[in-house]
Amino acid sequence: MAQPLVVLQDVNKHFGDLHVLKSIDLSVDKGEVVIVIGPSGSGKSTMCRTINRLETIESGTITIDGKPLPEEGKDLAQLRADVGMVFQSFNLFAHKTILDNVTLGPIKVRKKSKSQAEKDAMALLERVGVQEQAHKYPAQLSGGQQQRVAIARSLAMEPKVMLFDEPTSALDPEMINEVLDVMVGLAKDGMTMIVITHEMGFARKAANRVVFMDDGQIVEQATPQEFFTNPRSARAKDFLAKILTH
Amino acid sequence: MDELFDQFDIWSAFGQTIYLAFFSALGALILGTVLAVMRVGPVGIFNRAGAAYVNLVRNTPLTLIVTFCLLALHYQLKINLAPATSSTSIVDNGVRWAIVGLIVYHAAFVCEALRSGINTVPPGQAEAARSIGLGFGQSLRYVVLPQAFRGAIAPLASVLIALIKNTTVAYAIGVAETAAFMRDALEFRPDLSLMIFLLVAGFFVLLTMPLGILLTNLSQRMAVKR
Ligand SMILES: Nc1ncnc2c1ncn2[C@@H]1O[C@H](COP(=O)(O)OP(=O)(O)O)[C@@H](O)[C@H]1O
Ligand SMILES: [Mg+2]
């Protein structure tokens, strides 16, 4: 029986006068892969970032595995270790080698020994296909390789859920698939994932559900099949018409 | 030239300058780092205290700070940095208070140099650090500061060079360093004034120029590729 792992209830947030998250309710089950889609500026990134408290919220509650998000300090750091995050711009630690990028969290947060962390990191780098690059620096890798390292860095923390904020939109077209393939693999292995992306191929292959956001609200939720072939709301229809013409 | 070296203890004056510069630089780097962490940290009161310190100190003449240290803190408030009973108490207090003044003053500039280094680190680096579960201190220590230091080497070089030259204000409180030698030498050997000026200028150039070249080189080699 699936149980909710991430639950947002009546979450509200403003940036100044701008109401970016309007009473958001979202529940994601263990092992579920949820795609978040919607126009630019609709609040997708902000919603994602509230889940590991990179953004604070003004009202509502967010729970992970039944526990409300800690406000700050050690508990918050612990929570973040359990919530992986993959950014649009990779954000690999620029002064560290690929291997050190992946082992930093396990050594400093999970208190693994260096040798164990390196062994595990090499296995992860192999899983995402960049083991050859282990001793290079991020700037020496292609965008696609960097993003796969970023995924390995998150995986090294053995997170309960992974958040992806447009992981392929900074990539050259020929590199998109190498990253999506890794993500499809993760989904198949049962990782709980919340993915902001407009890649419909990925949505069709790996997603259980599509969440459509517009203007700070969740407007519609459906299976990928339903959503892409038969969107209910006018706003979703309008949005799909726009992205499908590209 | 030989006459000058015979007549004055130039080596010990040069040595005193190097001593002042070394310990002031060390102290200023430490205090400046603490101030920079206060200024970028999440605690509002520390932010404001750090900013107030920098603005106050940066806009006060160094001579005033150094003389304040000796005259107000030492002579008036009787704070001793060397045992009052020791035979070298007066000299030691002078040197140590000069170092304190130099540290206090240059820490503000070190802080600003580090902050400009921190500004070279994209916010995404700290976000990525936090999102793998590193705390505030760990994010600074393992991710932000190592990159900030690399980005701060060039501005720090300017601060260090200024600090070396600024050690000459210690002469205002009677420390027997290079500027004090210069004053004495000019007074007693006005016939050699040109040589005296060249000697002192040469000494400072010898001290600062290799440092400048070294640090510029280092900052290029250590630059974080993005
Ligand atoms: N740090 C911020 N400060 C002020 N406004 C912001 C900030 N981050 C995002 N916004 C605004 O909030 C809205 C939602 O942004 P975002 O969540 O990034 O949308 P999306 O990811 O869907 O494009 C946008 O109008 C954006 O300009
Ligand atoms: Mg976004």
Image (spheres, rainbow, N blue to C red):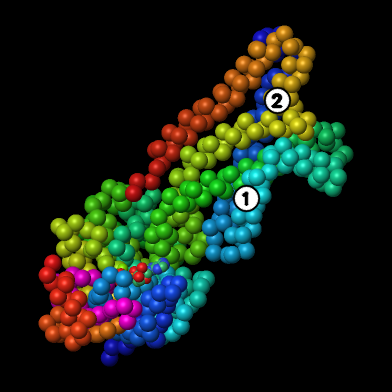
What residue sits right under mark 1 in the picture? B54
Given residues A139 and A137, the one toward you in this image is A139
Q: Does label 2 or label 1 sit earlier along the sequence?
A: 1
Which mark lies nearer to you, 2 or 1?
1
Residue B188, position in %: x, y?
78, 13
- Is residue A203 magenta-colored? yes
Q: Is label 1's Cβ within 8 Å of ligand 1?
A: no
> Is residue A211 visible to the viewer in this orientation of the structure?
yes
The relative height of residue B156 versus residue A180 in the rendered view (above or below) is above
Look at the numbered discs 2 and 1 and tell me whether their residues touch, using CB distance below 8 Å: no
Please, what secondary structure does the residue beneath circle 1 have? helix
What residue do we see at 32% from left, 64% from top?
A87
Q: In the image, B209: left or right of A132?
A: right
* Disc on res. A163: none
Residue A165, position in %: x, y?
30, 68
What residue do we see at 62% from left, 50% from top?
B54
**In the current view of this chain or complex, which residue is farthest to the bottom?**
A1
Q: In the image, B204: left or right of A216?
A: right
Neighbourhood count class around disc 1 (C-alpha, 10 Å): few under 14, some 14–19, many 20 upward: many
Given residues A239 and B84, the one toward you in this image is A239
Residue type at the position of mark 1: Val
Q: Chain of mark 1?
A: B
Quadrant in which the N terminus of chain B is drawn? top right
Residue B92, position in %: x, y?
78, 35
Q: In the image, A162: left or right of A234?
A: right
Q: Chain of mark 2?
A: B
Residue A108, position in %: x, y?
45, 62
* Residue A117 found in image quarter: bottom left
Please, what secondary structure does the residue beneath circle 2 have? helix
What residue do we see at 74% from left, 30% from top?
B171
User: What is the span of residues highlighted in magenta in the rendered image?
Assistant: A195-217
Given residues B197 and B156, the one toward you in this image is B197
